[in-house]
Amino acid sequence: MYSKTEFQDSSFIDDTEILSSLEEAKRLAKDVGAVRALLDKARECRGLTHREAAVLLEITDPQLEHELYSLAKEIKERIYGRRIVLFAPLYVSNYCVNGCVYCGFHAGNSCMFRKKLTMEEIDRETEAILALGHKRIAMEAGEDPVNCPLDYILDCIHRVYAYRNDRGDSIRRINVNIAATTVEEYRRLKAAQIGTFILFQETFHRPTYAKMHPKGPKSNYDWHTTALHRAQEGGIDDVGTGVLYGLYDYKYETVAQLMLAESLEKICGVGPHTISVPRLREAEGVDMRQFPHIPTDEQFLRLIAVIRVATPYTGMIISTRETPETRKKELDLGISQVSAGSCTGIGGYHKEIGQPDTPDTAQFKVSDNRTPDEVLTWLCEDGYVPSYCTACYRQGRTGDRFMSLAKSGQIHNYCQPNALLTFKEYLIGYASDHLKEVGEKVIDKEVERIPNDKVKALTRERLGRLEAGASD
Ligand code: SAM
Ligand code: SF4
């Protein structure tokens, strides 16, 4: 049970302010000069306020739209280069006491087979995820203080970090996506060396939140909306946020999302490390007719572009909820991290646990069923550099230390070599022959793009050592 004195003042999400921002934005969006001034400001990578971003959500002029998309691409390329970070979710338990009406795990879904992984199963899942070449996972669980208490999550985290496969590889960063909790529990998660604590707001619109969360601890809007502030208070300086697009109007949600980011920056000194953009998908035991707000692809691309230019240094994540076709466009406009080869059921990576005759335990249906090898080939063919880098986290460059490095422009001299070295490790250990061929070409080309000559030479040397059998 949480203490009533813990931070839970969610007044920074102000409904009147959101509506008035959108109202004013409709007017300003028709003023070509005003819109161009905002785009010019965003081009300097200083970010935009929620009011300014609202204007970009409202523009209808095709030429201005085109300018916004070009700018989103330009900013993405300037800050992140062509790198795309890969990860996989690991669902450890689908027990849940909440009633989220959109989720297959909701407590009232009697069709859902409930399961949580044993420690031996954690080993087998980790083995299977490592065999896909992953080094970074998002650990996911439903909320259930009895069947899935924090102690169980901590055991899972320790077990995954401790696991080594035959090549000596291990999971190097565990991001955690579990229910909102207390400062004390965040301290324990921090002590377990988690990467980012991720919590999706689902919807910022209070009446919709109440409708979507009719029962359980998650029905407390204020507690949920202030969780990332408490996480920072508990010492977790990389926090990730997101809206589940489809529950309410996407413009309202995007403005509110930026207000949350502003509040984190103001109160905690650093904004979110990542913003995820999940879009609602079909799920077992969920009636999809109750969601009239699912954004179209066009609307979805717009909100991605707006978030990209408004929060240039915040990583943006999409998952396999999106189809390969939309993922391609989303990457172009600002996404910097993607999941690949994902399973949203409990124990689904390891065939024996998720045998065809075992009941379905999946949270929702994924739309991109390609293997990581196929996803990586696709990324390379599109000119991207897949990255398995976890160096920032391992070297303590988190929170404001990461942000100041990113803002100094130095990130290229760190991230580009690390991306290439970790991709090289993937090619050596896990890639198909075809991907090896395509990937080596990408590496050759991208080494040349490293701006600093000394770093370039060092990277060549380290790539050579990996080729000769050393591990990095
Ligand atoms: N149970 C925790 C919670 O709700 O915060 C942890 C996260 S839950 C396993 C992961 C996320 O999946 C939820 O926050 C929600 O946004 C998303 N989700 C739930 N149902 C979904 C659906 N039908 N389609 C797409 N995403 C969904
Ligand atoms: Fe439980 Fe999270 Fe699903 Fe809600 S979204 S039912 S809390 S697993």
Image (tube, grey):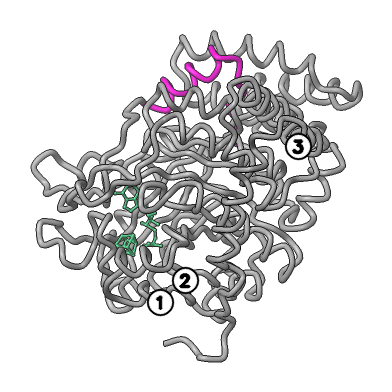
Q: Nearer the viewer, residue 143 or 357?
A: 143
Q: Earlier in the sequence, mark 2 or mark 3?
A: 3
Residue under numbered circle 3: 34
Q: Identify the secondary structure beneath mark 3.
A: helix
Image position of 191 with respect to 138: above or below: below
Q: Percent x, y for residue 387?
A: 60, 31
Label 2, label 3: how far apart the Cα atoms are: 36 Å
Q: Earlier in the sequence, mark 3 or mark 1?
A: 3
Which range of residues does the magenta coloring cover?
Answer: 371-388
Image position of 394 with respect to 459: above or below: below
The reply to whether callout 2 and callout 1 are in contact (CB within 8 Å) is yes
- Image-based side of 460 in relation to 301, left or right: right
Quadrant of the image containing the N terminus = bottom left
Residue under numbered circle 1: 220
- Image-based side of 34 in relation to 132, left or right: right
Circle 3 Cα neighbour tier, 10 Å, few/some/many (<14 / 14–19 / ≥20):
some
Residue under numbered circle 2: 224
Q: Percent x, y for residue 165?
A: 45, 42
Circle 2 Cα neighbour tier, 10 Å, few/some/many (<14 / 14–19 / ≥20):
many
Total labels: the figure holds: 3
Q: Percent x, y for residue 403?
A: 77, 50
Label 2, label 1: how far apart the Cα atoms are: 6 Å
For the point 41% across and 34% down, the residue is 131
Q: Is mark 2 within 8 Å of ligand 1?
A: yes
Circle 1 Cα neighbour tier, 10 Å, few/some/many (<14 / 14–19 / ≥20):
some
Q: Quadrant of ligand 2?
A: bottom left
The reply to whether callout 3 and callout 1 are in contact (CB within 8 Å) is no
